[in-house]
Image (cartoon, rainbow, N blue to C red):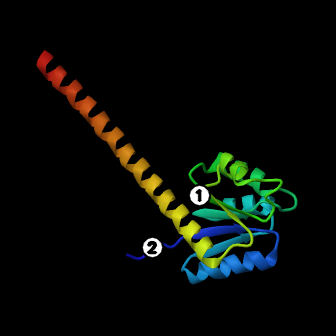
Amino acid sequence: MESPKYTILVADDEELIRNFIVTLLTKLGHSCVTAVNGIDALNKIKENKIDAVITDIKMPEMDGIILIREILKQSPELPIMVMTAFDEEYSAGTAISVGAREFIKKPFSLDEFILRFHKMMRDSDTLRRMKKEKGGDDDVQYLMEELEAALKKDKNL
């Protein structure tokens, strides 16, 4: 089964890393939008339909932790992967506690990146599907209540 194609926002102030991730994701069949910092990333999210975000933590003007908080205020379902070389100041726990779904420490291997990215997207798709199915249950519940009300009304006539 072919995996779905996504539009990924890659936010990193280091051009080399940004380009590396864009090249990798493009080879996997995804399209990418890039941002040089958190403020740029928020603007790109407003301008594009984004399926996931991959962000560095250390960036000028707005770091990745603040960026994650801002993104999730607008789009709580959006999966976010955090990359960082700075594990003294920020830990995986910090990134996850503000809402990131994945955390990867620089430098990372291609295999590790691809594995974590695919896991994040699979998990996100599963959550979305479960939510949609649960929403369907709510519709069924509503219809059942309507039917019961209609039947009671008929009995009373």
Front one among 69 and 94: 94
Earlier in the chain: of badge 1 and badge 2, it is 2
Front one among 43 and 122: 122
Q: Dot 2 corresponds to which residue?
A: 3
Q: Is residue 152 above or below residue 14?
A: above
Q: Is residue 156 above or below residue 5?
A: above
Q: Quadrant of the N terminus?
A: bottom left
Residue contact between numbered discs 1 and 2, judged by CB atoms under 8 Å: no
Asked which quadrant contains residue 60, the reply is bottom right
View extreme (top): residue: 156
Asked which quadrant contains residue 23, the reply is bottom right
Q: Dot 1: within a 10 Å radius of its alpha carbon, few (fewer than 14), some, or many (20 or more) residues?
A: many
Residue at image point 87% right, 58% down:
61
On the image, the x and y values in percent for residue 10 come to 69, 69
Q: Quadrant of the C terminus?
A: top left
Q: Dot 1 corresponds to which residue?
A: 79
Identify residue type, mark 1.
Answer: Pro
Residue at image point 34% right, 45% down:
136
Identify residue type, mark 2.
Answer: Ser
Asked which quadrant contains residue 50, the reply is bottom right
